[in-house]
Image (cartoon, rainbow, N blue to C red):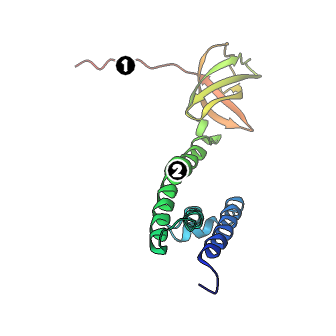
Amino acid sequence: MFGLSVQTVYLYGLIICGSLTFLYILFSDLLDGLSEAIPFFNPTLLFSFLTFFSASGYLFTYTSLRNYWIISISALIALLLVILLNVFVLIPLSSAEESLVFTEDSLKGRLGTIITSVPADGYGEVFIEGVSGTISKPAASFKNTAIPLGSKVLVVDIQRGNALVVIYEEVMTNHSL
C-alpha cells in the first residue's frame, strides 16, 4: 500500500492516531461544537478506536496470520476496548462533572443548620447538605431576628454571596377523614 509495508502502515497509523487522540483530549473544549453538530459523533471514541486498531494490527503483523484475519481481530479488539473505555471511563466522568456543580440560585428553598449563631443585625454561618456535598455559607436573618446555634433554617434568598435565612418551622397537618 503506497509502496510501504503493512507493518509501516500500521505503525504510521498508530503514531498519527495516537497523537491526534492526545491532542484532542488536550483541546477538546475548543472542538465541542463539532460533537454537538453531529449527535452520535464522538471524536474521542473514533480516535481511540483507530489507535487501538493500529496498535493491535501492528502487533499482529509479527504473527503468521493473514492480513484479513489481522484486520478482523484488530477491529474486534479495538471495538471491545472502545466500548470499555466509554462505559467505564467517559460516561462516569461526564456524569460526575455535572453532579458536583451548584449555583447560588439552587440553594434557595433548601434546609440548613446554623453552625455560627446569627445576631439580629449581623452575620453567622449556615451549613447546607446536598447531593453535591456540604456547603457552608455566611448567613443573615431574613427578618432581622437572632437565630441561635443549631437551629434548622430555610434559605429564602442569596444576596452578595450571603444566605438570607428564616427559622424553619415544620407544619403539622391532620389528614383524618
Q: Quadrant of the N terminus?
A: bottom right
**Neighbour class for label 2 at 10 Å: few (<14), some, many (≥20)?**
few
117 left or right, relative to 53: right
Seen as rendered, the residue at the extreme front is: 64
Nearest the eye: 46 or 29: 46
Is residue 40 positioned above or below 129 on the image? below
**Neighbour class for label 1 at 10 Å: few (<14), some, many (≥20)?**
few
The residue positioned 65% from the left and 75% from the top of the image is 8
Foreground label between 1 and 2: 2
Helix, strand or loop status at disc 1: loop
**Residue 24 location, quadrant:** bottom right
Is residue 119 positioned above or below 24 on the image? above
- Residue 73: image location, x then y, percent: 46, 64
Q: What distance separates the C-alpha of mark 1 from that of mark 2?
A: 44 Å
Seen as rendered, the residue at the extreme right is: 122
- Residue 153: image location, x then y, percent: 59, 22
Which numbered circle lies on residue 138?
none
Q: In this figure, which residue is indicated by the disc labeled 1?
A: 173
The residue positioned 50% from the left and 68% from the top of the image is 64
How many labels were placed on the picture?
A: 2
Do the numbered discs 1 and 2 sit on residues whose CB atoms are within 8 Å?
A: no
Is residue 28 positioned above or below 84 on the image? below
Kind of residue sitting beneath label 2: Ile
Seen as rendered, the residue at the extreme bottom is: 3
- Residue 173: image location, x then y, percent: 37, 19
Nearest the eye: 159 or 113: 113
- Residue 69: image location, x then y, percent: 45, 69
Kind of residue sitting beneath label 1: Thr
Helix, strand or loop status at disc 2: helix
Q: Quadrant of the C terminus?
A: top left
Which numbered circle lies on residue 91?
2
